[in-house]
Amino acid sequence: MESITKNRQSPDVLRAVIARAYGPGQVPTGDAWATELGHGLFNVAYRIRLRDGAEVVLKIAPPPHVEVMTYERGAMAIELATLELLATRTSVPVPEVHFADRSHELIDADYFFMPYVDADNLALVKDGLTPAERDAYNEQLGAANREINSLAGPGFGPLAGPYDPSWRRVFTGLVEDVLADGERRAVDIGREYDTVRTVLAEHATALDEVTEPRLIEWDLWDGNVMVRDGKIACVIDHERAFYGDPLMEVCFAGTQLPAFGDPTAFMRGYGRAELTENERVRRRLYCLHLMLIMVIETVYRGHTDSHAYDFARGELDTVMALLGRAAER
């Protein structure tokens, strides 16, 4: 998908970073050794064939002159920290980091190399699967997500801190950041921004039930799952991770918003029972946060069509209605 955040580089620059990561002897020659992987929504990623035939992926953060949303700042550093956590403390399959460079000497942004995963992206193949096959993958995803969430944090907030003992304070701060991003760019969210703030305040006591900070991916949807031979081969894209409430994981969104799919198999794999009333309120607040992001990011990413915006605006209206604020006519 096209986005102005994609930091594309020339073949000469790609050769230079390959030499730094793998040595001059691995710099490819000839043509057709680099292909952009097009399904990413934020970073640019290249599939690269090294001189010895090994295939790797180069992932590059957005250029510094492109304004990103507040929560997206420093995203690649978050991803690298999360990959290390998952690789050393869980059995969840994640790519190995071959080389990371945050010097900005060769490229004006962070970048890292990892192996190319020879597997299918679940988002791209799921429509061709049988219902039983889809359920099996979603059960595996639920189990993997639960293992990720088993990692306790020192407090709520970013992986590197600062930490806060109050989940209510951290989450309301996350929503306020998104609202401020939208106001800064005058994004039309279909209602007054202060109405959203009021709705959040009215339901914020539901957040006080959360007292144990856990590592959450928050963006672990089909597009970040690679599958092969009936198994999850790898989980990718970890730049949104932080310590929070596991119920914020995106695969729980379908419990409140049917457009996000049936969560039954995921919840079965996770070992999760039906949500309590308090949990349903929390999940609606998390859906509110997600839909605000999905509306507002279309402006930050320079989308040239309204498909993503229209979908998110409709789902934002739905979740606001669930929280007692139907769209004004």
Image (spheres, rainbow, N blue to C red):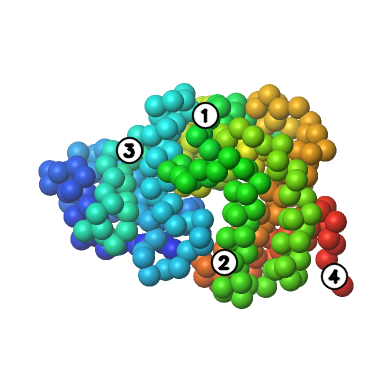
Can residue 68 be seen at all in this image of the molecule?
yes
Mark 4 closeness class: few <14, some 14–19, many ≥20 residues within 10 Å: few
Q: CA distance from mark 1 to mark 2?
A: 30 Å
Q: Position of residue 142 (x, y in %)?
A: 62, 30
Q: CA distance from mark 2 to mark 3?
A: 32 Å
Residue receiving disc 4: 328
Residue receiving disc 3: 97
Mark 2 or 4, closer to the camera: 2
Can residue 261 be seen at all in this image of the molecule?
no
Q: Quadrant of residue 283?
A: top right
Q: Nearer the viewer, residue 159 or 187?
A: 159
The label on residue 151 is 1
Residue at horizontal 21%, vertical 58%?
Answer: 105
Residue at horizontal 36%, vertical 64%?
Answer: 63
Q: Amino acid at mark 1?
A: Leu
Total number of numbered discs in the rendering: 4
**Cβ atoms at labels 2 and 4 below 8 Å apart:** no
The label on residue 181 is 2
